[in-house]
Image (cartoon, rainbow, N blue to C red):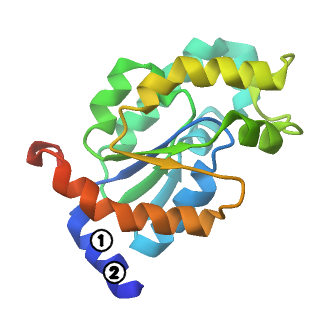
Amino acid sequence: MENNNRQVRESLKGINIYLVGMMGAGKTSVGKLLAQQLGYGFVDTDNVIEKAAGKSINDIFASEGEDSFRQMESKVLQEMSAFTRLAIATGGGIILRLENWGYLQYGLVVWLDAPVELLVARLQNDTTRPLLKNADLATELENRFHQRQPLYAQADLQISISQEQTPEQIAKQIIEAIPTVLRKRPQSNNGH
């Protein structure tokens, strides 16, 4: 396994891995494992935003609004894309801004595609998500998923997630798929 991870790491040539997908898909859990197994650093864009702003995502949404948050998110993504050898867990809406794709395209974009029912089960007691406040959770997630699905589908790699899968299994599935995905990519996208 370690030998395979080293080969995958070498085939990546230092490009970042960006995890995209809906809130609750497991981007942070899987991203930490990917970073560990590939010898990469790990960054969660939401955590960076909270540290930079000195307040929670909920507080940013409440005091400054979603547009302000999305601007911060784009700035963090821009800064992270200047680095190499990172596994980056992004916010669920990062794919909504065209400018963000300008940064994402220089890395390997992995869509963690979790069914809405699984997201509902994972998020039903989560009070930290500002976009889910005062909403029927299933309806809200369904609407957001359908709005974002065509954008997520632009990822280099789609990993369909089931209830039974552990983050370890998902990370392993991504690592095993990376060499095939890299072979199919135009060479101009393999790094800056």
Labelled disc at residue 4 = 2
**Label 2: few (<14), some or many (≥20) within 10 Å?**
few
Can see residue 179?
yes
Q: Residue at x 42, y 25 (%)?
A: 151
**Which of the pair 64/21 is nearer the observer?**
21
Viewport quadrant of the C terminus: top left
Instruction: Answer above or below: position of 88 versus 78.
Output: below
Circle 1 is placed at which residue position? Answer: 8
80 on left or right of 70: left
Q: Measuring from the top left, give residue 90's x and y in whole percent.
A: 52, 40
Instruction: Give whichever of 42, 136 is nearer the camera.
Output: 136
User: Taking 4 as reference, is 114 left or right?
Assistant: right
Classify 10 Å Cα crowding around label 1: few (below 14), some (14-19), many (20 and above). some
- 67 in relation to 10, above or below: above
Tell me if I can see residue 14 in this picture: no
Numbered tag placed on residue 190 in the rendering: none
Residue 176 falls left or right of residue 121:
left
- Out of 125 and 163, give the one closest to the viewer: 163
Three-letter code, disc 1: Val
Q: Are marks 2 and 1 in contact (CB under 8 Å)?
A: yes
Residue 110 x, y percent position in the rendering: 42, 47
User: Which quarter of the rendering shows the N terminus?
Assistant: bottom left
- Residue 16: image location, x then y, percent: 34, 53
User: At x 36% / y 77%, what residue is drawn?
Assistant: 5
Element at label 2? helix
Estimate the x, y position of residue 115 in percent, counting from the top left.
Answer: 65, 39
The amino acid type found where label 2 is placed reads: Asn
Q: CA distance from mark 2 to mark 1?
A: 6 Å
- Secondary structure beneath dot 1 equals helix
Residue 98 position by quadrant: top left
